[in-house]
Image (spheres, grey):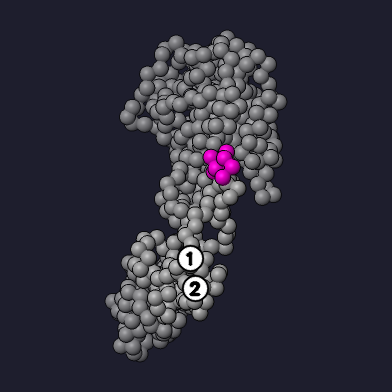
């Protein structure tokens, strides 16, 4: 680069240097230029200019028209445009700021009626503004106008650099320059021999500009799931993966959730039309029936009332992963186990900042001799500690299938946040399955945890393909 720059006195642009050096990576120019500048052989000049582009509102205005344009178009269609009409046509949110804009353009309000004198000048200003938004160009007046409005246009600073040979740079005879190999990475191979002692090393310059590498990586949510998986595997658990289409009997009856429980209603659970019914053996439904009605062979008195075996066969999207836990125990009631699942569940929630109809649970059980509440609490605390969350507490809670039941809360930014439920399965649940030992069980929300770990205040961020946000996410 030095010998190239020596060939003329005037500054060189990036493209020129790239071409003359036969390089195709601008990082090389930046690095070499920086090195030469440090040695006083070259001078780097930086200039910056502002480029304007559309902000969020600007993009909307480009597609739908500026607010004043839409109001103006509407005004022109009205015989006697009034405030009430404007509010009902544009809604409160737009009518307020809209009338401000119109007043600035010369529209007045006369006893609720909108009046103006000069059609032409209003029209002209609006057309000019709309044209500007449709194609941003150098126009001082428009830029200063839109700068004063929110999110319509945004400034972007563009920095250009040029490199120019200095006096001492010119003096430097390139034939005196020696090409020398310098080591940039100290590898284990190098260290195994003695040669490294005579080598020249490239010093690090952490002040250098560099571009962010844009490589593929796991979605933060997927990365988090992987991390949770490896924590449970490390703690000696094995994973279960199961279908989310299930019969209500497994999702609810087997868990001693009464048939008139509100969570069973259509407005809370997604029932399926295909398959509308899922076969469940008569043996199971009659066991559930007797447990629910009278407590069956357990010491319980059950819920009373009449149990409907057809309800057990209704197909649904599982509302919790506990449905799979219970099936696991049904298959292996006498083998001590530690199993977990991180999987999707469905509930009819309306979507907002903290709710989605489709989300994930972190589910797990421990069945073994002497399994008890302290063991359960310790396991959960250990899990959260491994996730980097040290302040965890439990509070008494209620679930139809556990006793005692508890809620798990973690401290986040000074507040206690509820992350899930847990408890020891009731005899009504475990006895009919023939479980040999007490079962500690839990089910915790994954998205909530993700919000904490990733510092989000809106859960939806996890499921929209916001590339800018995704590329900024740390590798978990
Ligand atoms: N299934 C419960 C829920 O969805 C959580 C839970 C699991 C509670 C296991 C106790 C035992 O909220």
Q: Main secondary structure of the magenta part?
A: helix
For label 2, the crowd category at 10 Å Cα-Cα, with few meaning under 14, some 14 to 19 and many 20 or more, is: some
Q: Secondary structure at mark 1?
A: loop
Q: Residue at x 51, y 13 (%)?
A: 332
Q: Residue at x 54, y 29 (%)?
A: 363
Asked if marks 2 and 1 touch (Cβ < 8 Å), the reply is yes
For label 1, the crowd category at 10 Å Cα-Cα, with few meaning under 14, some 14 to 19 and many 20 or more, is: few
Magenta residue span: 187-195
Extreme left residue here? 77
Q: Residue at x 63, y 26 (%)?
A: 423
Q: Which residue is mark 1?
A: 177
Q: Is residue 238 left or right of residue 145?
A: right
Q: Is residue 89 left or right of residue 394?
A: left
* Residue 175 higher or lower than 284, as above or below: below
Does the magenta segment cover residue 97? no
Q: Secondary structure at mark 2?
A: loop
The quadrant in which residue 5 appears is bottom left
Q: Nearer the viewer, residue 469 or 17?
A: 17
Q: Which residue is mark 2?
A: 172
> Residue 386, how many percent across, how many down?
63, 36
């Amino acid at each position: 680069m030095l010998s190239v720059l020596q060939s003329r006195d005037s500054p060189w642009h990036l493209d020129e240097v790239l071409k003359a050096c036969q390089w195709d990576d601008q990082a090389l120019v930046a690095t070499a230029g920086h090195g030469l500048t440090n040695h006083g052989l070259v001078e780097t000049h930086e200039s910056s200019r502002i480029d304007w582009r559309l902000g969020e509102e600007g993009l909307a205005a480009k597609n739908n028209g500026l607010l004043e344009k839409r109001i103006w178009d509407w005004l022109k269609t009205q015989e006697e445009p009034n405030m009430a009409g404007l509010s009902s046509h544009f809604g409160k949110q737009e009518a307020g700021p809209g009338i401000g804009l119109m007043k600035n353009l010369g529209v007045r309000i006369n006893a609720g009626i909108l009046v103006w004198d000069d059609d032409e000048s209003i029209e002209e200003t609006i057309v000019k503004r709309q044209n500007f938004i449709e194609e941003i160009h150098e126009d001082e007046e428009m830029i200063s106008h839109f700068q004063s409005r929110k999110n319509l246009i945004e400034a972007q600073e563009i920095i250009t650099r040029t490199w120019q040979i200095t006096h001492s740079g010119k003096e430097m005879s390139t034939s005196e320059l020696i090409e020398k190999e310098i080591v940039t990475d100290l590898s284990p191979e190098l260290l195994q021999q003695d040669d490294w002692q005579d080598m020249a090393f490239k010093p690090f310059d952490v002040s250098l500009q560099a571009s962010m590498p844009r490589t593929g990586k796991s979605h933060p949510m997927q990365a988090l799931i992987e991390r949770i998986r490896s924590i449970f595997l490390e703690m000696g658990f094995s994973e279960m993966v199961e279908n989310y289409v299930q019969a209500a009997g497994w999702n609810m009856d087997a868990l001693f959730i009464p048939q008139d429980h509100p969570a069973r209603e259509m407005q809370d659970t997604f029932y399926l039309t295909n398959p509308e019914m899922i076969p469940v053996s008569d043996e199971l439904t009659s066991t559930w029936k007797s447990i629910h009605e009278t407590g069956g062979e357990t010491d319980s008195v059950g819920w009373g009332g009449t149990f409907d075996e057809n309800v057990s066969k209704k197909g649904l999207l599982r509302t919790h992963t506990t449905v799979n836990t219970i099936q696991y125990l049904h298959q292996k009631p006498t083998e001590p186990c530690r199993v977990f699942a991180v999987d999707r569940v469905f509930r009819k929630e309306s979507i907002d900042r903290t709710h989605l109809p489709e989300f994930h649970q972190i589910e797990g059980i421990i069945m073994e001799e002497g399994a008890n509440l302290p063991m359960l609490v310790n396991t959960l605390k250990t899990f959260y500690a491994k996730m980097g969350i040290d302040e965890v507490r439990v509070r008494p809670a209620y679930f139809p299938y556990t006793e005692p039941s508890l809620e798990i809360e973690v401290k986040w930014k000074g507040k206690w946040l509820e992350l899930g439920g847990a408890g020891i399965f009731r005899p009504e649940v475990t006895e009919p399955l023939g479980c040999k030992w007490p079962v500690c069980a839990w089910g915790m929300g994954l998205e909530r945890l993700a919000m904490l770990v990733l510092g989000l205040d809106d859960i939806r961020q996890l499921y929209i393909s916001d590339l800018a946000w995704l590329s900024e996410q740390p590798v978990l």
